[in-house]
Amino acid sequence: MALVSVSMLEAEASPVGGRLGAGAQVSRSRTALALAAVALVTAPIGYMTMFSVFRAYDDEGSFLITLRDYLSGHPLLTPNNSYYGPFYYEVMGGLFKLLGVAPTNDRGRFVTLAVWLIASVLAAILVYRLTQNLWLSLAAQLVAFSLLGSLSQEPMATYGLISLLLLGLALAATFTTTRPRAAAALIGALVGALCMVKINVGAFAVLAVVFAWTCGLAPPWRRFAAPAMAGVITLAPFELMRDLLDRGWVLDLALLTGLSAAAVGLAGMATARLRQSPQARWLIVGGGATITASLAVALAGGTHPADIWNGLVVSAFRFPQLFTWPVNINPLADVWAVLSIIAGAVFLRARAPRPISDMARVAAGLFILLSVLLLPSSLFLLGLPLAWIATLGPRGRPASYHRVLLPALAVMESLQAYPVAGTQLSVAALLMIPVGAIVLHDGISGLRTASAARFAPAALLLATVALALQGFLAASQFAAGTPSGLPGAEAVRMPAPQAAQLRQLVVAIDQECSSFITFPGMNSFYVWTGQTPPTDLRYGVWWLTPDATDQQATVSQLSVRSRLCVVKNQSIIDFWAQGRPVPRQPVVDFIEQNFADGGTYGDYQLLVQR
């Protein structure tokens, strides 16, 4: 993976500093070999992590079964498959079609593992492009690997592809000086792809890209456009979360991200006019071409034009009303953000003496990287108010587009932690890795002392310790588990009782049921049994979305089936419901009135027709 990307390591975007001691500056080939070696070391840790857990809420199964639907000719963006855009299915579905295999738990996890490793290498390449420092590049690779370990919780979810697109977007921005047209078109294409995976993630990227672009306009236009866009990115968190701002954690998160965006806006406006800002027409061409192509493929596959708006936009904005998972945040974080923006304003106005500011950069960079390593703790949120520091390069160097884009993009994409701070939290923190690395590098370069240069290998050492701990935990969990023995998931390991219960349940389904539905959606059972879902109900929360499907028509469809069963898991229903009563809906009523207990298998219950 790293060897394929050797050409990307060429030092086009003149790095800030880079003379950090003997051995720090190495040839591209040696750098690529180092990245490849780290990838080989992390691969077995990734494998053990990826195949050592199965989550009963089974988002994994939802992605597998909807991918199977797509490969069998089902249209995208239908009312029953509307939470994710077409680009994900076109890419992942195309990959499975190219390989000539059907999506299963094992195959999906191998794909996710490959994405995980590639994203880690891509993070290292990005940091190398920004700093030309091997120590920090390897540290970034390890931190990214540790951070994206959360992909193992929901294999085949969109988060892996989103991670690749975000890192690719930041990397493309570093080429705007030497390849301005190609870089601009690629930036637009990647933003368009993000919009076609998850519209909110794409919208955050649009705001960051446009803000950075306004900072490169000619003075008459910049004087108006840059402050206007700074205001937009500051207010964006409040607009996104307005329906739930009465909840304490939501308001605190909106304040923190809004203040962090304001600090980035102030820093961006304080820079000189950017060197080689991408041209708007090439950004539009790249984005428009990607969006048009993705939608054209979806329409050719049977998607109705009326479903595009509802599927891409309406469903995304309605989801916070269905399910939330709070971020662990309190008002002290907002106080920290206020202090940071005040310090930034003072610094930008007065310019602190250089040694002090460089030491502050070192401290800020180390803190940001450490906060990312400590995830799933939400400590990384405290690094967001420091992201503005990355906007300001060393004195004497012209302002660069990627210097403004990267911190703006990092802050905007942190909004992925809303409304569900699960695996999303890791993707929300991903771009803080290059932010922390470039801030640390700037500080070390400014100090220009041998002792300061040791901070870079110290960061690598810290990341190595974290990797060792992760490897120990992964090996322990892998050894404690047993192969599931389930068709399509033979390599997945889990506690022996859980594996036995699932195997027994699959056998019971094969013996008792000609078809079955799951309540809530637990679609891996269709992979394990080899059966096809009898209805269009797919996602885990189908029973919380009354107008997501014509449930009365679904009841009519189910009522004529003989030997129909229901696989029910009350603990997962309670998890999704979050204390709310289960809504009275036709399918739920149909289950309660027409089915009786046919056996219990741990938390699972098989219901058979009365």
Image: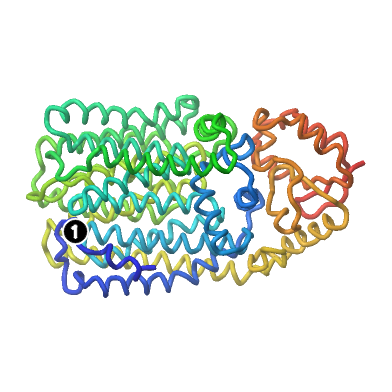
Color style of the picture: rainbow
Residue occupying image coordinates x 80% and y 45%: 566
**For this rendering, which residue is in front, 273 or 567?**
273
Residue occupying image coordinates x 52% and y 46%: 422
Residue occupying image coordinates x 24% and y 59%: 129
**For this rendering, which residue is in front, 69 or 112?**
69
**For this rendering, which residue is in front, 351 or 296?**
296
Q: Residue furthest front?
A: 300
From the viewer's perspective, tell me whether residue 523 is left or right of residue 421.
right
From the viewer's perspective, tell me whether residue 579 is left or right of residue 269.
right
Which residue in the structure is indicated by mark 1?
12
Q: Is residue 318 visible?
A: yes
Residue 356: x and y in percent read 13, 49
**Is residue 394 placed above or below 451 in the rendered structure?**
above
**Is residue 569 placed above or below 588 in the rendered structure?**
below
Q: Is residue 347 visible?
A: no
Residue 191: x and y in percent read 37, 43
Residue 435: x and y in percent read 28, 50
**Is residue 442 placed above or below 545 in the rendered structure?**
below
Residue 518: x and y in percent read 74, 45
Q: Quadrant of the C terminus?
A: top right
Q: Secondary structure at mark 1?
A: loop
From the viewer's perspective, tell me whether residue 400 is left or right of residue 75.
left
- Label 1 amino acid? Glu
Q: Quadrant of the N terminus?
A: bottom left
Residue occupying image coordinates x 39% and y 61%: 120
